[in-house]
Amino acid sequence: MYIYPDNLKSKATMWLWQLKDIGIIGVSALFSILALTQAGFFVPIVLTAVYAFLTIRFEDTSILDFIQYACRFFFTQQLYIWRLGD
């Protein structure tokens, strides 16, 4: 089911993912299946499943967005300048 963006301001979604995420999941799933059948290497399919889980969207936010915001808050340099009255 394709859901058109509200008031043309939000991004287009399909099921529980944005369309960009569905493309990434689809391409990586093809690569993962190829790696599993040809080489018996199952790590890519696990990474694809983890990415698919982290990008599920509820009310226009996902777990991956939250992790990115938290990393940006805790690991980027925060600069505070204290001044006496201007």
Image: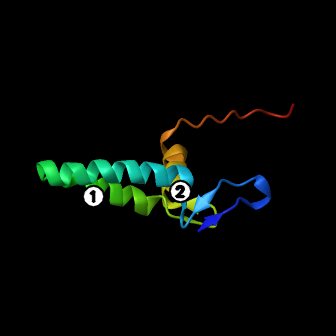
Q: Residue 20 appears at what percent x and percent y? A: 53, 49
**Contact, mark 2 vs mark 1 (Cβ under 8 Å):** no
The three-letter code of the residue at mark 1 reads Val
Q: Residue 37 appears at what percent x and percent y? A: 16, 54
Quarter of the figure that contains the N terminus: bottom right
The residue drawn where x is 75% and y is 52% is 9
Q: In which image quadrant can residue 50 be found?
A: bottom left
The three-letter code of the residue at mark 2 reads Phe
Q: Residue 13 appears at what percent x and percent y? A: 60, 60
Mark whose residue sits in front, 2 or 1: 1
Q: Which residue is mark 2?
A: 66
Q: Secondary structure at mark 2?
A: helix
Q: Relative to 35, say whether 84 is above or below.
A: above
> Mark 2 and mark 1: span between their CA atoms?
21 Å
As drawn, the residue found furthest toward the right would be 86
User: Label for residue 46?
Assistant: 1
